[in-house]
Image (cartoon, rainbow, N blue to C red):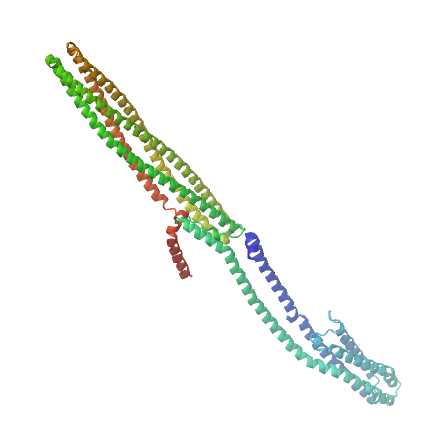
Amino acid sequence: MRRFWNNLGFKKKVYIIFGGVIIAIVVGIAYGQFAFHYVQVGGSYYRGISAKRSLIDDIARIRMNVNMVKASLFETALMQDQEGVNFISGLMDRTDELFQVINRYKNSDSGGENYCGLCHSLGQTKEVFDTLERAAGAWNTLHLTVKKDFMSAVKGGNFEDAQDLISGELNERYFDVMESTSQPLNLLRGIYPVMVDKIVKKSWNTRMAYLLAGILGVLYFSGIAFFFVRAVVNPINQVARQSQKMAEGYFIIDNTTVTGEDEIGMMKKHFSKMGKKVADFVSGIKSGITSLSSAAVELSSTSDDLRERTKGELYEVNQVVGTSREMEDTFSEVKENAAAASQATRAASEAALKCKTLADKATAQIRRISDIVHDTADTMEKLGRSSEEIEGIVSVINDIADQTNLLALNAAIEAARAGEHGRGFAVVADEVKKLAEKTGAATEEITTRIKAIQEEAERSLKATGMSRQEVEQGVEVITSVKDSLDSILGVSEDASKKVAEITSATEEHTEAIRRINERLHHLAEGIREVSAATEQISQVANSLSSMADELKEHVEWFKTEDDKDGITHNIQKGMLERYKEEMSMG
């Protein structure tokens, strides 16, 4: 039965409830009309009492007329007054009319032969009218004897015969009539107070029955109201409590309470689906923020390592620059003092060999710097793609927030149409609208943060590209230096054989060293720029990490299934406090 009720639509539930109320009212009115039909003025009991009173009066008048007829007969016979015959004739006609009236009581209204109100239940109607029929027969015999014999004797002057009739046959008929009317008269006079008492009791019983029906009606309507509140308002309160939890950030949906296939059940089901969808999106955002934060930390660590390495490379380059300057001074001395050419050549060979070693180290360091710059660029590109993916997710959340806002507006419109019964819908619609607005504001904040991250990533990517170009140029310079040093070694070996060419060779080497110094100077500048770029990358990475932490703080406001174990105790505590508050309020 409960399952059948839950599967009914809300409109059908209202029709069934109010249909039962209307049927109860109609039945009560019909019963009241049926009861009042008996006890009200003009009802069957009232008409029965009125009929009994009229019948008693008519029987009493018949007896009075019979007595008057007898007295008039004696007076006419004794006084020998022929004029008294006319009076007697008129009196007897009126008595005949009364018997005819009494005869009609048997067919009064719809009662039929036995109609006489309450005396039906006593089984006395037939006895009354049978006795009255005998009285009517005795009266007809009396009437016929008076007209045929008595009046003929009086008109013929035979007053003695008239007196004999009075004392004989007429006297017997007189007693027959009086005796036949006395029994029903006494019987009806005894029934009349019984009928009055019966109608009083009937009225009391009717009043009690109506009072009982009213109490049962109140209990019935109270049960209907309680059941209606339980079946309609409780699910709305469940949705309201769930929306309150969502407004507080708890998106942990309990689908076990979603029952019924009516409009309220469908609303609860769709509301749960919406909360689950939002919780899934929030979980995805949290995962993306975690990845973003890890990438930012890794980028900061990589940039710090690169900065330390560029400092070492800069130190090595400065050492090479110092060495090349010493070589330039040495070749100047060789030019000025040809006698020391051999020694200078050996010094130049040693210096060239050292420069080659340093150049090899510089080449290896620069190549490592190049690899680091490439890795940094790849990391920044991945960071840009992750930001774009997060921006897409935020856009989907924003669309869901807009759709939720539209659903809240539709729910508010339906609640306004429902009037008083839609007050719970209005509360739910308002809570859903606030949730949608808060979600929209959060997504706008997230979008702003992501755009800032993307801008910083683009700038870092550009700076990394420039650093990569400078590093490649540095590699080329170091390669040239290495080649030059190889030439210096060759010249130093030939110097021992061609002392004559010392001056020319010294000039060539001096020019070569000058170019090396210039290239080393450019290489040092490039390394300084790489160092500055890594410093900037480190700042950007720190900024990105701070933004990720701030974004994580905003997203942590949403509590999903992943956070259920950590917040179950707090939820139960909050629900217990709200329950105590509701109980204290009534």
In this rendering, position of residue 227 left or right of residue 288: right
Q: Nearer the viewer, residue 330 or 30?
A: 330
Please state the horizontal and vertical placement of residue 570, each as a whole percent of the image: 37, 54
The answer, for residue 336, to whether it is visible in the render is yes
Q: Is residue 395 above or below residue 265?
A: above
The answer to whether residue 14 is visible is: no
| Residue 253 position within the rendered picture, expressed as x and y whole percent measured from the top left | 44, 49
| Quarter of the C terminus within the rendering | bottom left
Res 468 quadrant in image: top left
In the shown orientation, is residue 471 left or right of residue 118? left
Dividing the picture into quarters, in which one does residue 48 lie?
A: bottom right
Viewer-closest of 254 and 86 = 254
Residue 274 placement (x, y as % from top left)? 46, 45
| Residue placed furthest toward the right | 156
Q: Residue at x 37, y 44 (%)?
A: 555
State how many labels appear.
0
Residue farthest to the front, as pictured: 497
